[in-house]
Image (cartoon, rainbow, N blue to C red):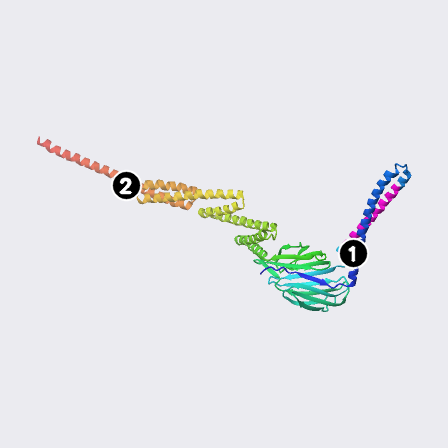
Amino acid sequence: MESIHKCMVVHLTLDVAHARREFFHKFVVSFCILGLLVGLHMQIFCVFWDKISFYFLIPQNKVETFIWHQKKITSMHRHMWTWAIVCLFFLLLTNTQATYSADSYRFEWTFTPNVHGSVHVELKVTVPYSINSYQLNFYKGTIRELKAYEVKTGNPVKITKTEDGKVHFKCEFDNAQKGFQFLVEFDYLNYVVEKENEVYSFHFGWTADHDTTHQAMVILPEKHELLSTEELNPANLSVFNGQARVTFHKYVLKSDEFAFTVIFSRKGIDLVEEGDSKFNQKMYNDAKRAYERAFGFYSNLLIKWGWGESESVDQLEDRVENCDMLLADEKVEEAMTAFVSKDYAAAQTLFSEAQGIYRSIEDAAKVSECQDFIDQCTEILELEKYVESQMDEGITYYDLRKYDQAKATFEEALDAFKKLEDEEKAQECQKWIDSCEKYINLIRGMIVLAIVAGAAVVYVVIRRRKNVQKGETEPNEREE
């Protein structure tokens, strides 16, 4: 939807009293200016007369006459200065009264825009003079539910509508006196434009051919916030019943303009509320995502349009950082649980993730603390890997019945398991060592037995040989 600059132009039918007041004001201003000019000329005359008296009367020894002239000139100086000050005072007073006169028309506007494009307008007018009619001129647009009535009595006011490129609404009264108040109420359609995704803009402009006093209140839709204003700074910003209220004040001189633009949205509020809700539920990942989206939303508006405040963006950045801190702390808690449970691989991963978050928020102390645990996990994991390889090697030796080598390998693994404080693995390793020793002892016993048996066999063989030799010797002796 294209942004269309719309203005409301008000013209009032003034009476003769107003014209007389205008004439009197101009007369007083002209008289004061004339008085100032006369005073200025008299001052110049006094200066020249003083010089002339000095040069002409002193040389002629007319000292008394010179002194008399000096007194006269001094008196004229005082009177002229007094006259100039009085004229200047009346000029300023008259101009101030004209500028901030209680006799100016007073307009109290109430605007209630909505995101569907329409604006509900209420205008209360306080009349300073006797008038018979009042006319509102609008740029051509769609106006619905137009009505006007007296504030005091509630009686309806006659309205006549005409169009000639603009839309004119003329209110007619039966000799409305000074202080008379009436209210005009209507809906202006297609008046609110969407500037960005869910960011809306409402512009209002007003001109007249006479001095006026304005007070305007813009009541934003529920849960919407004011992002920025243009043309005129707000006099006040408040919240009532969940709706932000922006107030503008301005005294508008003849042919000047009372104009302002209000930019509002609820997207940022919704994202922040979502983040707060997730944060309170300790769902810090979801909270962080919501805060980051809100941060991106406000940052884009600030950079692209200059809407919003850098302080709000900084606060969201702090919330994101706070979520990061809590997420990192959660990671550390999980890592410590895994570390105590001797799940060093999981602990190392979690400590590394926490360290990355701490590094992003520049917490050097936490980064160093995580690094210490990462180093411990790395050392333990390397030792576990070494132990597992030793166990595999020991079992291989065991299967090959190389029990001495298997025992030595298992003993190295046992020392490592004791360092790791892994009692279960240490007990398993000890069983392997015991089994190796059992077979080693068995083999040793068999070897001893074999040696003894071999010795016995040798002994028997030797005895038999000796007996055989002895048996062969005895027959020979008998033959001899």
| Magenta residue check for 84 | yes
- Of 71 and 407, which appears nearest the observer? 71
Q: Secondary structure at mark 2?
A: helix
Q: Position of residue 290 (x, y in %)?
A: 55, 54
Q: Is residue 468 visible?
A: yes
Magenta stretch: helix, strand or loop mostly: helix
Q: Give the quadrant of the C terminus.
A: top left
Residue 435 lies in quadrant = top left
In the figure, is residue 415 to the left or right of 202?
A: left
Q: Which mark is residue 26?
A: 1
- Of 388 and 32, which appears nearest the observer? 32
Which residue is denoted by mark 2 in the rendering? 446
Front label number (1 vs 2): 1
Amino acid type of the residue tagged 2 in the rendering? Met
Q: Position of residue 105 (x, y in %)?
A: 74, 60
Amino acid type of the residue tagged 1 in the rendering? Lys
Give the distance between the C-alpha atoms of the residues marked 1 and 2, in whole angstroms. 139 Å
Q: In this picture, which residue range is highlighted in magenta?
A: 69-98
Residue depicted at 35% across the width and 41% down the height = 407
Q: Position of residue 172 (x, y in %)?
A: 73, 68
Q: Secondary structure at mark 1?
A: helix
Residue depicted at 47% across the width and 44% down the height = 374
Q: Residues within 10 Å of mark 1 (few under 14, many from 20)?
A: some
